[in-house]
Each structure stands twice: as structure tokens, then as C-alpha cells.
Image (cartoon, helix red, strand yellow):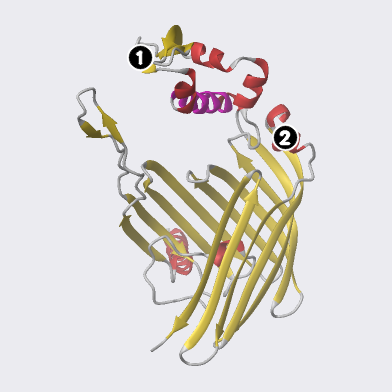
Amino acid sequence: MRYILLFLLFSITTNAQILKKVFKYSTLYAAYTQTNSIQPPKTFYVTQNSDLIETTRRNPADEIKTIGFRKLAFFGYEDKERFYDGSEQNNSINSNIGNVKGLEYLFEYQEGVQQGRKFENKQYFVRYLSDWWIAKAELNENQLIDLNYKSADLRLRLPVTNKLSLSIGGQYRSYEKAYGYNPIQKYLEENNWWELSYFYGHYDIPYNWELWNGETGFEYFWYDQNDNLISYSDLDYRRGIYGNLVNRYNKEQLALIGGFADVSAVFGLDFYHYRKSHWAHMYVNVLPKHKLVEGDKRYSYDTFVGSENWLDYSLGGSFGLNLNRRFGLFAEFTNQRWWDRELKTIRLGVNVKL
């Protein structure tokens, strides 16, 4: 019994020390942001009695709710005193070096509205950085750019100098969407456009028209599945209603295809130099070779581009120069292209202290 108690005490003490090390310097944060959205130009409708009615569709305010839990070491050029709100550019996530060795992580959830469109974003990131190897796992769901994937990355790290580092290894990525494949394009190659409307229960009725100058012609009224009049012409129908049917068809067809998984070769290059007067931090990750390991090859991205050798990449940099005590310059950029999805950010600025 004595040995069991000693073992339990040792286990509890050891686990407590491990947990303390894992969560030390971590931060729990939450934020809410609201801004005015861009509003469209005013539109009006004039009745038969010359009454003017405004028909402008107003967009609700843009808003973002964020909650997160993170442990990411700051680089020397990053602001250590600012409050987290989820809008920070976390260069440590995409680069293959960190300001400290060991475990880092980020778990962040966002929901909000942008230009009247609701969205949810998730980013979960865990990395262990050693002197000679890197292990990383990530989940990224970004509904604003329709990018959704899970990845696991294992690399050998080769420090060239104390500022320059190379990495080489493999990356596994799984994703639920057939990137590059557009179902409606194939449908329209084999069918007339109006057949999609009939498929979803819409129907048209022809009618003749005549202008005051004697010109005549014919057009089509369009009705929905509940016999409601929804458009007065083919052109009006295609400009408005038809786009919703296309989006619905694409979503339904892509859901039938299922998910995919790739194994890719990955190479990284990182450079970091910091002084209070100037700094430069750059990273590049390149995935040049891919192999489909799960999913229907007919709809895979390598079938879309015609090769297993397409180039996915992520790169970025942060640069700063303090010319004197009062004047400074800075620049930041990121560019990630995976499959046919691309995300870019650029920030340039001048700081003048009066």
C-alpha cells in the first residue's frame, strides 16, 4: 500500500510539473469588434402614381467575435504589450523557427458578419521545435476564402548559420472539397442553361411584347416551384435568380464527391535578424510534389492541373528600420497559395514620434 501511495504521489507531482510547463506563458483571450459595412448606392422604385420608394438593400454592420488560447513566443520586433484580439499576424505559425525551442500552440475560433454574410473561422495549431527537427499539426477553416484543411508536418531542420535555417520533410493534408473542380461548368457543357432551372422546379411561360414605336418581340416570365412570379425576362432571371441555383448545384455536387488527402514533399527556408535599429524576418515553404492517398482521383486537384507536380507555397516577411529616435519604417507581407485558394496580406507604414 505504501508503494502504491508513493507511486500515485509521484505521478501527480510529475503530471503537475508537465502541465505547468505546457501552460506556462500561455494566454486566454476574447474580443468583439464592430465596424460599419460598405453600403451599396441608393436604389429607388417609381410606382404608376409617381410615388418614389427607396429599395436600397442595407448591409448590417461588420462584426467579429473571437475567443482563443495561445502560447506563441514573441519575436524581438513584435509588440509584447498589446492586447490580443485575434487580428494579429502570427508570423511564428508559418515560419519554421521560433524565438524559443519547445512547444507552441494556438487555438482560435471566430464568428462574425462581413458585408451581410455570416462566417465561422477556426485555426488550431500545435508545433514542437527542436534544434534538428520540427513537428507541426494544424486545422484551418476559413469560410471567407473557402479554405478548409487539416495537416501534419514533420521535417528535419538544418541550421546553416545562427540566422539562416533550412528544413526538409513531408506533409500530410486532408480536405473535404474538390479544389479546382467546378460542377456547373461540366453541367453546362452537356446541357442547356435553362434545364438546371427546370431541375429545381422553376418554369417559364413565353409572352409577346410590343413597344410604342411598333417594335415587337417575345420574352419569358419565370416562376418558382410555388408558382410565384420571380422574373420578367431571361436576362433578368440569369442576372439574379439563376446565380443562386448555380451555387446550390455546386454545393450539392461537391458534397457528393467526398474528401481527399495528399502527401507532399515540403522544403522551408527561414531567415531572422534582429536589432533594435533594424530587423528582417523572412520565411518560404514550398510543396512541389504531391501524391493523392485518399479520394476520387477523377475530381482530385492533380487531375484538374494535369500533374502531381503543381506548386503550393506560403511565404512572408517582416522588415523594420528605425532611422533615428523619431522616424521609422516597417513592411509586412504574407502570401499563401494552396490548391486554387490564395490569401495575401500587405502592410506598409511610417512611424513619426513627435
Task: Measuring from the top left, give residue 276's x and y in whole percent.
Answer: 54, 87
Nearer to us in this view, 232 or 238: 232
**Between marks 1 and 2, how big is the CA–CA gap?**
39 Å
**Stretch of the chain drawn in magenta:** 241-254
> Does residue 251 belong to the magenta stretch?
yes
| Dot 1 or dot 2, earlier in sequence | 1
* Residue with the most extreme front position: 213
Task: Measuring from the top left, give residue 315's x and y in whole percent.
Answer: 65, 62
Nearer to us in this view, 228 or 146: 228
Q: Amino acid at mark 1?
A: Leu
Residue name at image x 73 percent, y 48 percent: 264
* Callout 2 secondary element: helix
Considering only vertical position in the picture, is 243 above or below 90? above
Disc 1 + disc 2, Cβ < 8 Å: no
Residue 350 visible in rendering: yes
Quarter of the image for residue 303 reads: top right
Q: Residues within 10 Å of mark 2 (few under 14, many from 20)?
A: some
User: Magenta stretch mostly in which secondary structure?
Assistant: helix
Residue name at image x 79 percent, y 36 percent: 306
Quarter of the image for residue 4 reads: bottom left
Considering only vertical position in the picture, is 223 above or below 81? above
Q: Which mark is residue 229?
A: 1
Nearer to us in this view, 214 or 42: 214
Task: Measuring from the top left, give residue 201's x and y in whole percent.
Answer: 45, 11
Residue 2 visible in rendering: no
Residue name at image x 20 percent, y 30 percent: 51
**Residue with the mark numbered 2:** 304
Quadrant of the image for the N terminus?
bottom left
Considering only vertical position in the picture, is 325 above or below 201? below
Considering only vertical position in the picture, is 97 above or below 246? below
